[in-house]
Amino acid sequence: MRKNAATERRDYIVSVRRSQVALAFFLFIFLLIGHSWPAAAELFRPETFNLSNGMQVVVLTNRRAPVVTQMVWYKVGAADDPWGTSGLAHFLEHMMFRGSKAVPPGAFAHRIAENGGTSNAFTSWDYTAYHQTIARDRLELVMKMEADRMANLQLDQARLLPERDVILEERRSRVDNSPAAILSEQMYAALFRNSRYGRPIIGWAHEMQALSLKNVSAFYHGWYAPNNAILIVAGDIDAQELKPLAEKYYGGIAKRSIPVRLRPTEPKNKSGLQRRVILYSADVRQPNLRHMYLAPSPRSVDPLDICAIQVLTEILGGGATSRLHRKLVLEKSVAIGAAAYYEGNFLGETVLNFSLTPRGDTEITQRMMALDGALTEELEDLIKNGVTEEEVRLVRERLIASTAFARDDLESAARIIGEALATGDTIEDIASWPQRIAAVTAERVNKMARSILVEENSVVGQLMPSQSEGKP
């Protein structure tokens, strides 16, 4: 039995996460809100406590409407898939909707929908999350079912095989039929040669086809435990009201030993050459140029350096006032769009991305060469001459002010804090973000630009229509 449409429409950022289709939404989340995770702590004043089994609970009270969002975050994702089983974390996410003795296959989403709520889930490299939004007086329903599948998921061959067909079809429709998604996949594989971030979240097709009941069962019993999970509830409830419910439904689940999470670093590119990936396809209607730079993990450098990268990203590609938009779109007219984004929620080494769309009606190869040269020129100018204190001041103010966008959205609030906590931050780290951003200087931004924007630490990608270069 297939899941209903709401469940099937799960957040496919999982594998195409930085495709052009999803780019606009995620630029909003990560540039306007995602960069402001910590400021959300001030906006929502989270309350937090731990259950005796080690499960962390966070409450974000918002009394604007009698509605709540429950999210359960597991600190495990696609980068924890054992070698040879890529796509396993995402596959288990699907299997979590396949039921238990108490909740038959398909009933989870159906029961929530018939009570006026919505439910979904998503997988990333470093976490997996399940969420429901429902009326406040139906909160116990979703807590009971979510806790049940944490402890009592039924896994058998009869449930596994149909769902494996579902994820294979998802890959065919969302990746194999999308040149933009294929390019992203190949660029990550080229950039991350030693890290599991080089594998797609949805998995390589041949490894997905071989995923077995033994694989899924071991992953579920190894990682899905309360002491490896975070419960976040946002909306018309406070900690005093939630604590007895959390203890009732989650507190009785036994904690377990959790495997060690490995995030190996990348070796130096001793060739000194910049890597390039060019994809030609008859399905490409809009060419695209991407530059992807290896960037430090938020867990490996001074938190102020991470804030400096966030400011650098905004200065270069954070909207209509950014350098790249001003220089390449307005002044040089070689692009119709230019954006930058920093993957700030990785446990391991991460990525600073640039995505540009060429302008003009001349031959596409010439346009792409001109755009690539113009981008390189702007980055070299920044490295040589640096950013100004005024640019940094304006971006600092904009980033802090942008947190207001999250104020009225329960799911965004829960997601912002959930991503931060699931990738190693604490509530205290989150709360201190505005002070760290306020302390960023032009000198620190320039230091991070010089350390990241190095050709041999990058991959260039080009998405091209097949007519170019005489391709068939």
Image (tube, rainbow, N blue to C red):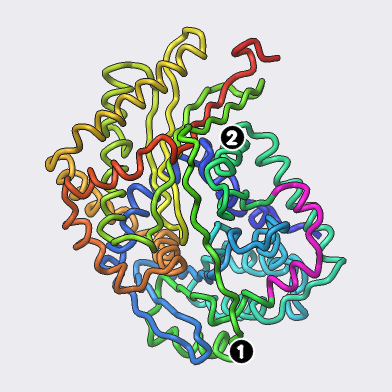
Q: In the image, is residue 214 part of the stretch drawn in magenta? A: yes
Which residue is found at the position 77% from the left and 72% from the top? 104
Whether residue 376 sits left or right of residue 137 in the image: it is left
> Local crowd at mark 1 within 10 Å, few (<14), some, or many (≥20)?
few
Residue placed furthest toward the front: 270
Which residue is found at the position 65% from the left and 59% from the top? 90
Name the foreground residue: 463 vs 193.
193
Q: Which residue is mark 1?
A: 254
Nearer mark to the viewer, of 1 and 2: 2
The reply to whether discs 1 and 2 touch (Cβ–Cβ < 8 Å) is no
Report the quarter where the N terminus lies: bottom right
Which residue type does callout 1 highlight? Ala
Is 456 placed above or below 41 here? Answer: above
Measured from the top left, where is residue 347 in percent x and y?
46, 62
Visible in this render: residue 121? Answer: no
Dominant SS in magenta = helix
Which residue is found at the position 58% from the left and 26% from the top? 278
Is 276 placed above or below 189 here? Answer: above
Which residue type does callout 2 highlight? Leu
For residue 427, what is the image quadrant?
A: bottom left
Measured from the top left, where is residue 450 in percent x and y?
29, 41
Residue range highlighted in magenta:
204-220
Measured from the top left, where is residue 273 in percent x and y?
48, 32
Residue placed furthest toward the right: 158
Measured from the top left, where is residue 76 in percent x and y?
57, 67
Name the foreground residue: 309 vs 457.
457
Q: Which mark is residue 188?
A: none
Q: Which residue is mark 2?
A: 183
Q: Secondary structure at mark 2?
A: helix
Q: Secondary structure at mark 1?
A: loop
